[in-house]
Amino acid sequence: MIEARRVYLVTGAASGIGAACCRALAAPGGAFLVHTRKNMAGAEAVAEQIRGAGGQAEVMLGDIGDAAVPAALVARALERFGRLDVVVANAGFADKTPMASITAQSFAATLDTVLWAFLRLAQAAAPAMQDGRIIAISSFVAHVFRANVTTFPTTAAAKAGVEALVRSLAVETASTGTTVNCVVPGFTRKDAAGHTAFTPEQWKAVTANIPMGRLGTPDDVAAAVAFMASPGAGYVTGQLLHVNGGLV
């Protein structure tokens, strides 16, 4: 066991928003458990960036939708670093399957990966945290419903559930000083090698609907996460922070 100044668990951290959160939070003396489902190379690259910033990092693989994995991640962080201060629940995926084509299996997979995974992480982490930070990454898809914006029915339902859990858990953890908050990205640019739900032409149409005239970046979202993880956010709990360029 290695004692660390502050210990972070970030899920879905091999690329995109999760990787950006690790970079934004990395500092000398900090320690990270970098989670990914299977992208070991990406996660190791993020771990090296953390080490380059003076922190410690370990990578752990696992399907966050597996009921045993969230608690295993928390246990590994505690075993490796002796404590847990910040959990960033980022792992998930976007499913734009229209309602008529949704199956019980596909709906369950989204709920397992997004909603159940967050609940299981919080259940495992909260008892070990004092003055901690639990931060869920939600999505605009739980808020924006109109004809000119693609809908993501199963993801919207799961993310809305996460947001409701955030509010409830914030009340339950308040007595320990642990805050529970949600950062809600708008349309966010993907990594060059990452999966994208739209074609380049569709992304142009999407951008036209954003008041600020550009897509968000993983770093934009990570900056909000860093605030929620900071001492300055110690009296902020049960909140949703939208990072969306004015999208409504």
Image: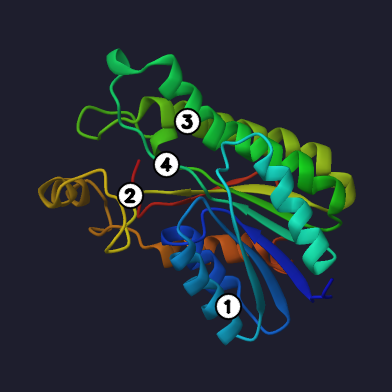
In this rendering, position of residue 140 left or right of residue 210:
right
Under mark 2, the amino acid is Phe
Residue 185 in view: yes
Q: Earlier in the sequence, mark 4 or mark 2?
A: 4
Q: Position of residue 151 (x, y in %)?
A: 30, 30
Kindly indicate whether the residue at mark 3 contacts the one at mark 2 (C-beta within 8 angstroms): no
Q: Which residue is mark 3?
A: 110
Mark 4–mark 2 Cα distance, whole angstroms, equals 14 Å
Q: Which residue is mark 1?
A: 50
Q: Which residue is mark 4?
A: 93
Numbered tag placed on residue 187 in the rendering: 2
Q: Earlier in the sequence, mark 2 or mark 1?
A: 1
Residue 236 in view: no
Tell me the SS state at disc 4.
Answer: loop
Tell me the SS state at disc 3.
Answer: helix
Kindly indicate whether the residue at mark 4 contacts the one at mark 3 (C-beta within 8 angstroms): yes
Q: Quadrant of the N terminus?
A: bottom right
Under mark 1, the amino acid is Ile
